[in-house]
Amino acid sequence: MTETITTCQICGRAIKAKKGLIAHHGYSRPGYGWQTASCPGAQYLPYEVSHGRLDGVILTIVNDWLPDALKAVDDLWSNPPETLKWRDRGYGNQRGQQYEAGRPDGFDRDYALRTYGGKGTYNGIYTRRMGEAKAHAQGMAQMLESLKERRAAWIAPEAAA
């Protein structure tokens, strides 16, 4: 079978579809050798043929990923943990330093988020954790909107011909 360049339903990249399915893609080695998983659109029919995988990922985001991300933000806000741990990245082959801090008496979330407080402090770790949780939820919401737009633009193969 000849290689055809088609479009991944999920990421929208042009990908070879040698056997009619989108090839594995998305693999990279960012930073110091960590590997990313293949795109969720790999091994599914291309966008030009189907929107089935797109529909499934949209449902997963709506029903699982986005609610979980929003719950993580809400939980961190409403129930700050007794202790927080954080490890910085380190450099080269070195493991980063581990930080652990207990929640101070009279902990004020608003104050912590306004002032940061330093990387080894509870306020600093809390601020970092809250920022990461909010960014993750925001990323999920943006991904959902992007996938919904791609789904709305899908044209059935018969209609495209």
Image (cartoon, rainbow, N blue to C red):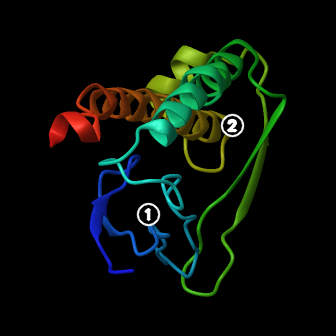
Farthest bottom residue?
A: 93
Kindly check if marks 1 and 2 are in contact, taking CB atoms under 8 A apart as contact: no
Mark 1, residues whose alpha carbon is within 10 Å: few (<14), some, or many (≥20)?
A: many
Residue placed most toward the observer, 80 or 120: 80
Helix, strand or loop for disc 2: helix
Please name whichever residue, 132 or 13, is drawn nearer the observer in this view of the structure. Answer: 13
Please report the residue visible at 37 percent of the width from the left and 54 percent of the height from the top: 8
- Horizontal side of 35 relative to 27 (left or right) equals right
What residue is drawn where x is 49% and y is 72%?
A: 27
Q: In the image, what residue type sits under mark 2?
A: Tyr
How crowded is the residue under tag 2: few (<14 C-alpha within 10 Å), some, or many (20+)? many
In the rendered structure, the answer to whether residue 8 lies left or right of residue 103 reads left
Q: Quadrant of residue 14?
A: bottom left
Tell me the distance, in whole angstroms, between the alpha carbons under discs 1 and 2: 46 Å
Query: Does residue 93 lie above or below 112 as drawn?
Result: below
Which of the 4 image quadrants contains residue 122?
Answer: top right
Q: Is residue 94 left or right of residue 137?
A: right
Residue 51 appears in which quarter of the rendering?
top left
The residue that disc 1 covers is 22
- What is the secondary structure assignment of the residue under circle 1? loop
**Residue 81 percent location from the top left of the image:** 80, 28
In the image, 135 versus 140, the foreground residue is: 140
**What residue is shown at x 55% (from left), y 40% (from top)?**
128
Q: Residue furthest right?
A: 82
Q: Which residue is mark 2?
A: 122
Residue 19 percent coordinates (x, y) = 46, 72
**Could you tell which of marks 1 and 2 lies nearer the N-terminus?**
1
Residue 158 drawn above or below residue 76: below
Residue 18 higher or lower than 129, as above or below = below
Residue 2 position, x and y percent, is 33, 80
